[in-house]
Image: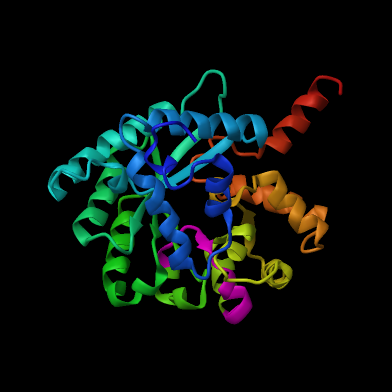
Amino acid sequence: MRAGHPLATEFPTYESFEEYVTKPRASLAEYLELHALVEPFQTLETLPYFVSKLVRGAYVFEGICYLELRHSPYYRTDRSLTQEDRIRQMREVVEVVGKAGRSREYPLIMSQILCMHSRLPYEVNNSLIDLAAALPEYVCGIDLAGPDIFYGERMDEWVRLFQRAQEMGIKTTGHVFETPDGCYPELLPHLSRIGHGIQIALRYPEILPELADRGQCLEVCPTTYLKTGTLTDLDALRTVFERCEAAGVDITICTDNAGLHNVRLPWEYENLLTQDVIDFDQLTKCQDAAFRHAFAWPHPDPPRVMLDSWIQGNGG
């Protein structure tokens, strides 16, 4: 940890900080508090450093060519400003993140998904939709995040916001059916993709045909469920993959937040394979589905197909 950093007093060594950040939590709400630990340090001045480091790591260590970065720009604004001024500053945050994500050295495709948040007021969340519509060169979608225990009391509001985003042609996803507290079927028709959604397959498999008819996929983040206490092991995910495959529902495999987990995408794959949750054929289907459902992937085929075609065309 850098000398003089505010967290250095509480965590004098990098190892102690890493251990604190990556240890399992008792609940999703407790896990999400970790974001509040780092958000104050992700300012307009420091965001280029954080984003460029993220892009470099994804490109070099994970072999990633396409990245969707989810965040709540409001939490990266100046906390000394009024709410109205912070809403205005969100645009600058999105532009700074977008420019920092474009690297000649590490030329992956990066776009942002702006997160509405269950702890933020309607005015802020509604402004995120306007911002997404105004900056399509940097933003590819809208999400709903935050503790899902707060969703229910504002359900009409979330439905209206998602409907508005859909009417404006903005792609949508949402953290729903991740935990037993976040099971709100009324949100599902308004989502292009379903963030997590494992409780659908585990508790409400009768809903899966509706997802298949709408062409929705589940965004499954294996390590997250261990860190949040949602699952005690990965065995339950075998049921999720099997039921989704039988119903014709695609699954994409995601890291969610490799920094909080210390598990990058290749290791997510490896954990699922070595624990016999999926096989290699299922993995390939999930990888292809990730690009098919990606909000900003500019090509009709996934990289695997494009590379195969290039090799065959060059006499490989």
Give the side of residue 221 with respect to residue 36, left or right: right
Instruction: Name which quarter of the figure residue 249 lies in.
Output: bottom right
Instruction: Kindly identify the residue that appears in the image at 26 percent across and 68 percent down.
Output: 157
* Viewer-closest of 234 and 65: 234
Q: Answer above or below: position of 150 versus 256.
A: below
Residue 82 is one of the magenta-drawn residues: no
Instruction: Kindly identify the residue that appears in the image at 70 percent across and 32 percent down.
Output: 306
Q: Position of residue 27 (x, y in %)?
A: 50, 70
* Viewer-closest of 299 and 158: 158
Q: Answer above or below: position of 205 versus 101.
A: below
* Viewer-closest of 222 and 284: 222
Q: Quadrant of the C terminus?
A: top right
Instruction: Name which quarter of the figure residue 57 lies in.
Output: top right
Instruction: Kindly identify the residue that appears in the image at 44 percent across and 31 percent down.
Output: 3
Numbered circles on residues, count: 0
Q: Position of residue 150 (x, y in %)?
A: 34, 72
**Residue 116 showing in the rendered view:** yes
Residue 202 is one of the magenta-drawn residues: yes
Q: Position of residue 171 (x, y in %)?
A: 41, 51
What range is drawn magenta here? 189-206
Instruction: Name which quarter of the figure residue 147 lies in.
Output: bottom left
Q: Answer above or below: position of 138 versus 37.
A: above
**Residue 142 showing in the rendered view:** no
Give the side of residue 51 with respect to residue 74, left or right: right
Instruction: Kindly identify the residue that appears in the image at 81 percent across and 54 percent down.
Output: 281
Q: Position of residue 208 (x, y in %)?
A: 59, 73
Describe the colour scheme in one phrase: rainbow
Q: Answer above or below: position of 307 versus 34.
A: above
